[in-house]
Image (cartoon, rainbow, N blue to C red):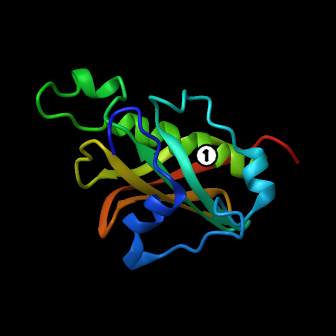
Amino acid sequence: MNAGQRLSAAEAEGCFADQRVPFGANGVCCSEAAARRFRSPLPLATGPHWVHLEGDEGQWHALLAVPEALDCFRGHFPGQPILPGVLQLAWAEQLATVLWPQLAVAKLLRVKFREPVAPPAVLRFVLTRHEGKIAVQVERPGIRVADWTFHCTLTQP
């Protein structure tokens, strides 16, 4: 993937061919309701973009294409860029609040960044809701990159 180039759903799926997550008939995601609720506020030409989203009320899988052109790579770290962990946290929180709008993240539990992520990358976010918590796993193909748990509160009854 070159800087500024969008990754297609088929290319993203190919990155996880050994752990295939099926696409819906539209080639984008299996849940039209979730797709309508999710809108990335980031510029799609140079920023990360969600290329796949599927799941149900208990668990969601989302693929995020992270291009080399992302501004954070210029200073983190020059000559050997690494995706900042805080961005992974922020993207997962953004996704969680879209998928479960009645929940708000109150605190983080057991945050572990296991492997660095160099650009460009395709990351799979797996969010699993259980009671008042959302477990998050971030993966590259075949490698767990990070995991943590969001402790949540209800924003709506």
| Residue sitting at x 30%, y 38% | 83
Towards the viewer: 68 or 80: 68
Q: In the displayed structure, does residue 155 sit left or right of residue 2?
A: right
Q: According to the image, label 1 marks what residue?
A: 95
Horizontal and vertical percent position of residue 25: 71, 70
Mark 1 lies on a secondary structure that is helix
Q: Quadrant of residue 134?
A: bottom right
Task: Residue 50: tell me if it is visible.
Answer: yes
Towards the viewer: 121 or 87: 121
| Residue sitting at x 41%, y 67% | 14
Height in image: 110 above or below 56? above
Height in image: 91 above or below 20? above
| Residue sitting at x 34%, y 45% | 1
Task: Residue 130: tell me if it is visible.
Answer: no
Horizontal and vertical percent position of residue 128: 58, 64
Horizontal and vertical percent position of residue 7: 46, 49
Q: Quadrant of residue 119?
A: top left
Q: Quadrant of residue 123?
A: bottom left
Q: Amino acid at mark 1?
A: Leu
